[in-house]
């Protein structure tokens, strides 16, 4: 089976840097994605790591270590609009379903 | 217009009723998914389809069925709705999983009384 763990809540101040961790246990791991969701709206894609290392997209970066079954999302120069839920999601190999399994989400609150 | 459209956006129904949630997409993607989200929780995969003739069960398929009527349409049915199926339902699409990116609809909020 698959399981993902991430913190349920994180609080940070505007302008700061915050890291949201994700650990996973899965068979047929292929890659790790991150999604943002505001107030029950449609989740939106942020980044994907298929290989070990850091991927940077503007203020957001994502990291993956396959050997540690671990990844994180790094948000820099936090803004109030970054207050949202963030989900990590594991992509499973096609021959084992090819599906995307989501974690329970981390609610980020950005304070002034 | 949205690339991934879900109807209805909101629905209140009674226990035992049959409900269909519809999803259509204009992105030309082969892969379509139905997820369920309960308050404060993540997205749980109900069913997914990689093409018109391919249907796969997800983590929580019991009590649900799907139909892939065309590349652009993927419907989710609750044959006999029960209160614990009250949730927010999302449809999503992808062209491939090389980037791990899904495109989500705006969601269908279902309440079963």
Image: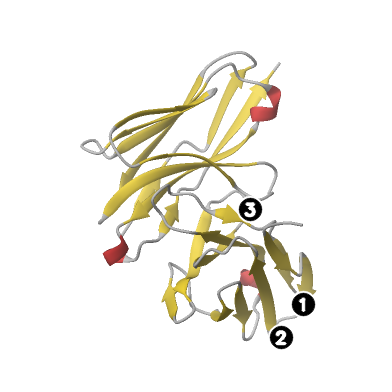
Q: Give residue B95's mark.
A: none
Chain letter belonging to callout 1: B
Same-chain check, marks 2 and 3: yes
Q: Is residue B30 above or below residue A103?
A: below
Dot 3 or dot 1: first in sequence order is 1
Total labels: the figure holds 3
Q: Is residue B39 visible?
A: yes
Q: Do the residues under discs 2 and 1 have CB atoms within 8 angstroms?
A: yes
Location of the C terminus of chain B (image quadrant): bottom right
User: What residue is shown at x 45% (from left), y 48% (from top)?
Assistant: A103
Dot 2 or dot 3: first in sequence order is 2
Location of the N terminus of chain B (image quadrant): bottom right
Cα separation, mark 2 vs mark 3, equals 23 Å
Report which residue position mark 3 lands on: B39
Q: Give residue B17's mark.
A: 2
Cα separation, mark 2 vs mark 1, equals 7 Å
Q: Is residue A96 above or below residue A38?
A: below
Q: Is residue B50 above or below residue A105?
A: below
Chain letter belonging to callout 2: B
- Residue B98, image x, y percentages: 38, 51
Report which residue position mark 1 lands on: B13
User: What residue is shown at x 54% (from left), y 19% (from top)?
Assistant: A76
Render colour scheme: secondary structure
User: What residue is shown at x 68% (from left), y 86% (from top)?
Assistant: B16
Seen from the viewer's position, the closer of residues B98 and A69 is B98
Mark 3: which secondary structure? loop
The residue carrying pointer 1 sits among few (fewer than 14), some (14 to 19) or many (20 or more) residues within 10 Å by Cα, namely some
Mark 1: which secondary structure? strand
Snapshot quadrant of residue B9: bottom right
Q: Do the residues under discs 3 and 1 have CB atoms within 8 angstroms?
A: no
């Amino acid at each position: 089976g698959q399981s993902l763990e991430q913190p349920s809540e994180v609080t940070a101040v505007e302008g700061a840097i915050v890291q949201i961790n994700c650990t996973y246990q899965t068979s047929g791991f292929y890659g790790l994605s991150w999604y943002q969701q505001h107030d029950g709206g449609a989740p939106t894609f942020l980044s994907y790591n298929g290989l070990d290392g850091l991927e940077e997209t503007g203020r957001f970066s994502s990291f993956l270590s396959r050997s540690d079954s671990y990844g994180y999302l790094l948000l820099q120069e936090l803004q109030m609009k970054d207050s949202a839920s963030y989900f990590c999601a594991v992509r499973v190999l096609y021959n084992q379903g090819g599906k995307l399994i989501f974690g329970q989400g981390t609610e980020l609150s950005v304070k002034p | 217009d949205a690339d991934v459209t879900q109807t209805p956006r909101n629905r209140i129904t009674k226990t035992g009723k049959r409900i269909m949630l519809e999803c259509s997409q204009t992105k030309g993607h082969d892969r379509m998914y139905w997820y369920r989200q309960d308050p404060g929780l993540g997205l749980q995969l109900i069913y997914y389809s990689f093409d018109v003739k391919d249907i796969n069960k997800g983590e929580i398929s019991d009590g649900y069925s799907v139909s892939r009527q065309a590349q652009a349409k993927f419907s989710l049915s609750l044959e006999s709705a029960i209160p614990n199926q009250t949730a927010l339902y999302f449809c999503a699409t992808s062209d491939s999983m090389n980037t791990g990116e899904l495109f989500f609809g705006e969601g269908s909020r279902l309440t079963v009384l």
